[in-house]
Amino acid sequence: MPVRALLLPLLLLLAGAVRGEPFMVYATHDGFPKYYEQDGEAKGIVVDITRLCLDEMQLPYQFKMLPWARAYSMAERGGGGVIGLSLSAERQALFDFSEPIFTERIVLLVKRGREFPYQGIADLKDKLLGVTIGTSYGTAFDEAVASGAMTIVGFNDTRSGLAMLLRERIDAILVGSSVDIDRLAAGHLDLPPGTFVALPVPFKTDSKHMGIAKSLKMGWFLERFNQCLRRGQADGSLDAIVYRYTN
């Protein structure tokens, strides 16, 4: 692509910043340690990796931490980018995706004492699963829900899902393996550590991406972002961020 064609959208973005319009980056406020808000500041593994690359790109930006459904909706309407997005066929029709920012296992979390055998989606036929409203865990997940092979109930944030799990209203919730459940429950649910346990076989491996509505035509932006991710993987910068939050 000619250099001039690459420079034009960059200049338009910078012109927007001059008018007080930084690039908005949306994320959920309830996903420790991947993304969360503390004292009004966006933090987390995915947030800090994104911040590292946007700083390197020297482009003005602003994080906005919201309930996941709102964060997704704002990005879908072209209000900016959203981080923490999992790939699915439906979403790929709406968004341009970055390369993976962070990859983890998605596990089935249950109340201790209510464990059940699990090897694959077929074992969930008669179970009621909790998921954050607006979340997709990929095409296989979407197809299982659509076909009735899996029944889900939505909640606004993970703490609400834990409360439902505690009251045995649902059988399990889907959650990232990086999430510190005991910390998340502290101050919200009066529970001893270890009240919940993850089943040994993970539901899937899930990568989190930045997604930008195709209508914004910002593939050039994502390519620069991807270049930073590759450098960070090569020089250990990304691993250092993950280590800081998980050790």
Image (cartoon, helix red, strand yellow):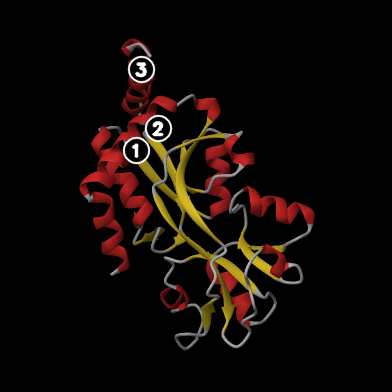
Report the residue at 23% width, 51% height from top: 236
Report the residue at 62% width, 52% height from top: 134
Numbered disc in front, either 3 or 1: 3
Residue at the right extreme, as displayed: 148
User: How far separated are the C-alphas under marks 1 and 2?
Assistant: 14 Å
In the image, taking residue 103 as reference, residue 7 lies left or right, namely left
Residue situated in front as seen by the camera: 35 or 237: 237
User: How far separated are the C-alphas under marks 2 and 3?
Assistant: 12 Å
Can you tell which quarter of the image residue 118 is in? bottom right
| Amino acid type, residue under disc 2 in the picture | Leu
Mark 3: give few (<14), some (14-19) or many (20+) Cα within 10 Å.
Answer: few
State the SS at label 1: strand
User: How far separated are the C-alphas under marks 3 and 1?
Assistant: 19 Å
* Residue 6: numbered disc: 3
Residue 96 in view here = yes
Image coordinates for residue 171, horizontal then vertical, percent: 67, 75
N-terminal-most mark, 3 or 1: 3
Q: Which residue is mark 1?
A: 61
Q: Which residue is mark 2?
A: 222
Q: So how many labels did they put on this image?
A: 3
Image coordinates for residue 78, horizontal then vertical, percent: 53, 33
In the image, residue 89 above or below residue 3: below
| Amino acid type, residue under disc 3 in the picture | Leu
